[in-house]
Image: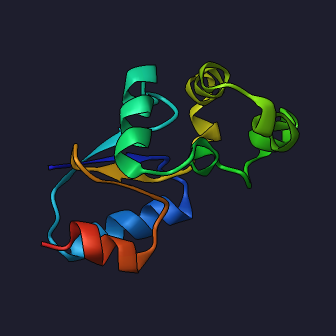
Amino acid sequence: MLTVFSYPPCGTCQKAKKWLDEHDVSYEERHIVKEPPSREELQDLKSKSGLEWKKFFNTSGKKYRELGLKDRLPDADEAEIIDWLTSDGMLIKRPIVTDGNHVTLGFRESEFVDHWQQ
């Protein structure tokens, strides 16, 4: 069973869930703002995704711009980055989809076909 960290009004999240539904892929949804990933979950997701921390940020979001993270991120250490991400689910790129072994960020159909099509 997949876990989908999403924000219901997010169009990208809606597309991802629609794709999963159309391909009969079971998932449990977690509201990324009401129940954001914990520090441990974020570290695990990053490790399993193989992506850099910057990819976990919703760089087009209002909160990202308000905090000036574009300029602050390059010099930040991991603890500070995780503090930012756990402080507000709106800072996290979404959806995050994981089966506990693999992780995808955002929605690209080709990635979903590779990872989540059964």
Query: Percent x, y for residue 70?
Result: 82, 44
Drawn side of residue 100 relative to residue 6, left or right: left
Drawn side of residue 77 relative to residue 4, left or right: right
* Structure colour scheme: rainbow
Residue in front for this viewpoint, 95 or 68: 68
Residue in front for this viewpoint, 24 or 77: 77
Query: Which residue is painted at 54% across and 53% down in the image?
Result: 9
Query: Which residue is painted at 83% across and 34% down in the image?
Result: 72
Location of residue 106 with respect to 64 vertically, above or below: below
Query: Percent x, y for residue 7?
Result: 49, 47
Residue 10: name its quadrant: bottom right
Query: Percent x, y for residue 47?
Result: 39, 40
Q: State which quarter of the image contains the C terminus.
A: bottom left
Query: Percent x, y for residue 68?
Result: 87, 37
Query: Which residue is painted at 64% across and 28% down in the image?
Result: 81
Location of residue 102 with respect to 77 vertically, above or below: below
Drawn side of residue 90 relative to residue 71, left or right: left
How many numbered markers are drawn? 0
Query: Which residue is painted at 46% across and 22% down in the image?
Result: 39
Residue 41: name its quadrant: top left
